[in-house]
Each structure stands twice: as structure tokens, then as C-alpha cells.
Image (tube, rainbow, N blue to C red):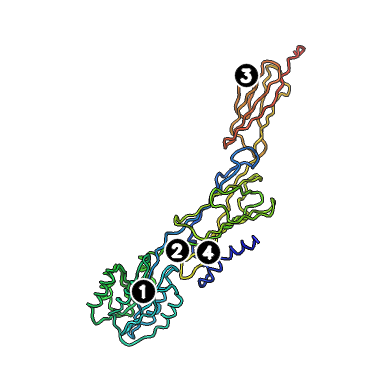
Amino acid sequence: MRKISLLIGLLIPVLLAMGGGSGAAQSSAPPLLQVTQQITPEEIFTMGSGLEPSTATVTLTLVNPTPVTPLDVVLILDASESADLAEVHAAGQAVIDQLNACDRVALIAYSAQVTKTLDLTDDFPKVKEVVADILPSPGSELRGVLNRAADELLRYGRLDATPVIVLVSTGYARNWSAVRAEGERVAEMGIRIYAFGANDLANEHLLSLITDRTGGATYSHFSTNGLAALFAELPRQVFPPSHIVITEVLPPYVEYRGAEINPPTDIERLDLHSPTLLIWNISAIGEANQWQTIYTISSQQTGRVAVFNELPLIRYVSYDGPFTQTREITLPTLRLTVRAAPTLDFEYAPLNPRPGDYVIFVGATPEGSAIQQWVWDFGDQMCCGSGQVVVHQYRAPGTYVVRLKGITPSGVSLTLEKPVTVEATDPHDP
């Protein structure tokens, strides 16, 4: 049952993406969610060795992009016979393609008369269909169009959205003063107007008088460069990613020891010889725009080990276009050096020393262990020594307890005591 629930959790983002439209993630698009993962310290001792540190901390941090400012856009298209309708259609479709899921668009077409086609909506496919169906009509009169667009934003616009009017027009008007007055009203409402010429003879002068007053801009004709410049001036942040699923798999030799904050939603492990599956399900990242989990691990396997059995995977739903998309981020594995507890030993020669003999002591550790400092106490209260190889003389016979202290590069202190017997001098020796 738990495995079924895990599968359902992993499928949720995919189903949501399919329900939002095309749902196909573009592999070339960069991830919108910023992710970092690190481990500290990078070197530990095996669990149960009695030495510290015996655990490492994995810190995974997710950071949202900049908070969202949505757009409410009124798209005004000149449908007169004098307009280049192919260019009008292209401009309208391209503007819609630049909008995010958090944005909305309304459509107004005009020729001799104004026709409000669609109120503000986030149904972008429908708006694109209506744009494609616009047919040319006799006459062209810009008067009244801007007032209609301003009323649309005043009536249906959101308080947290940036209001924008995009005008694709020949700029023809019999009464310039009336059109300029409409532009003044739009400017006083804090609405920007951006205009594209709808044919090669568009009245750029009148269009500029309108757009400049609102803080917008006029382009002689539609182009991708002009469209990019337009949207570069607008807040193009996206909605924070949601339905985030994090999957990390620890190999059998790595033990999950618990989390300081945000423990996994699910932990799956069949037995001590199986990998450990850690899964986090996060509906959305909060107002701080950051989410973090900190958990600890240990290992019984020594050497340079990989922390994850499979590359960590993060799936989430993004809103960086007109449709929701499912994105994936694959993280590199972390590596951890695990050391066994070093054990000390030493050898000495001669094995049966007598008073006055020079006794050579040599410290030793198993292969793979490291001792940085060696400190010797020879047990005769005379002196001490340092270094892996030392020489000492005993003055009197007896059994002495030699104490060796070793210090690892990480500061761990180890000790070993071993008796050394100094035999009395044989009176018959020459």
C-alpha cells in the first residue's frame, strides 16, 4: 500500500502537467528551481568505533525564483482593410506566447467600430483561435479603443497585476485630440501602452504621442526584437514551482539516522541489506522562498564511498509559459570518506634489552589509518619521546609499561600501553 502511494505521489506532477496543456517539458530550458546539496564533514569514522565524528550531515536547499508579478494585458488589434492582417495576426499570437500561466489577456478588435471580443482570461489557446479568425473590415478609427481597453482593466484587472495595453494599429484617427485625451486617461490610471505599426504607412507620430505619455514605446512594425524589448521592461517573474517531489536513494552501507528539520515524507527499506528510499513531497515552497532539509547519515563501510545509490532526482511543476510543465533536476552524488578506528602498535629491538642498551621503538598502524603525531612515555620516569621512530636507554632492569599516544589528522587521540622487560646484566658477560 505504501509503495502504491509513493507511485501516485510521483505521478501527480505528470498528470497536472498533462491537464495544463501540452505538459511537455523542454529539455533545453534551464531549471527555474535553484538547488544545492552538500555534506559535512566529508570525513567520518565508522559507526560504533567510539570515535567522533561518526555521522555526517546532508543539507539540501531549494530556493524559488523571484516572487511573482502577474500581467493583465489588453491586446488591441486593428482589423481594418488598410492593416496588414497577416502581421496583425502574427503580432497577436506572439504576444500571447510570451505570457505565463499567472497572466491574463483580453482581446479587442476594431476597424470603423470597436468590437470587444474577449474579457480578461487565462485561456490562451482560445484567445489565439479568436485572433486567427479576425477578418478585415471596412474603415479604421482609433478613437474609443483606448477607453474601452482602460475600462476592461478598471473593471476586471487584479490589484496585484501590472496593467498593460498592447496596440497593433495603423494609427489612423480623424480626431487626434480625442485619441490623445484617451491616452492621457490611460496614463493617469498607471497603465502602459506599447504599440506596433500594423502596416508600412502606420502613423508612428500619433502612436508615439500616446505610448510615450504612458511610459510605453512605439515600434514601426512588429518584430521579435521589438517584442523582446517590450517584455524586457515588464516584470516577467514566474509563479513559484509547486508539487515538488524529491527522491534520494541511500546504498545499503549508508544508514539514515534522522532529520533535524523537514524529515522525509516516506522512508522505504526492506531490510538491512537493501537501499533506503527517501522521498519528500512538497506542495509548494512558503513565503520565505526557501525550503531546506537537514538529515544525518552514518556508514559501516570504510573508504571513499558514494552517499547515494542513484543520482538524487527532483521533479516539480513550473509555470514559466502558457502551460504548466513538469521539470526535472538531477543532482550529482556526494562522496564521503569513512575511516575505521585507527589502532596503534609498536615494535622494539632488541627484544631482550639490558640496562644501557639503545632500544629502538617503531610505531605502526594498520594500512589506511593515519597518525600525525606520536608521543612516547617509556615508563621509567626519565624522559619522553616524539616521532614514529625513537631511541631510548633504560638504566636499570625491570618491567616498564611503555605508553604510546597517537593523534590523527582530525585530532582524534589514541593510546596503547605495552610492557617492555629490561633484563639484568649477566655477570659472566664480557
Asked if the residue under mark 2 is in contact with the one under mark 4, i.e. CB atoms within 8 Å, the reply is: no
Q: Please, is residue 3 above or below residue 341 in the view? A: below
Residue 23 appears left or right of 221: right
Task: Pinpoint residue 69: horizontal percent, then vertical percent.
Answer: 39, 64
Q: From the viewer's perspective, is residue 342 above or below residue 209?
A: above
**Mark 4 or 2 closer to N-term?**
2
Mark 1 or mark 3: whose residue is earlier in sequence: 1
- Front residue of 427/384: it is 384
Label 3 sits on residue: 381
In the structure shown, which secondary structural element does the residue marked by tag 4 occupy? strand
| Residue 403: x %, y % from top left | 65, 26
Q: Residue furthest right?
A: 428
Q: Which of the two marks, 1 or 3, is nearer to us in this view?
A: 1
Which three-letter amino acid code belongs to the residue tagged 2?
A: Phe
* Residue for badge 1: 74
Q: Secondary structure at mark 1?
A: strand
Give whichever of 108, 262 is nearer the camera. Answer: 262
Q: Which mark is residue 239?
A: 2
Amino acid residing under circle 3: Gln
Residue 176 lies in quadrant: bottom left
Alpha-carbon span between mark 4 and mark 2: 14 Å
Name the foreground residue: 275 vs 44. Answer: 275
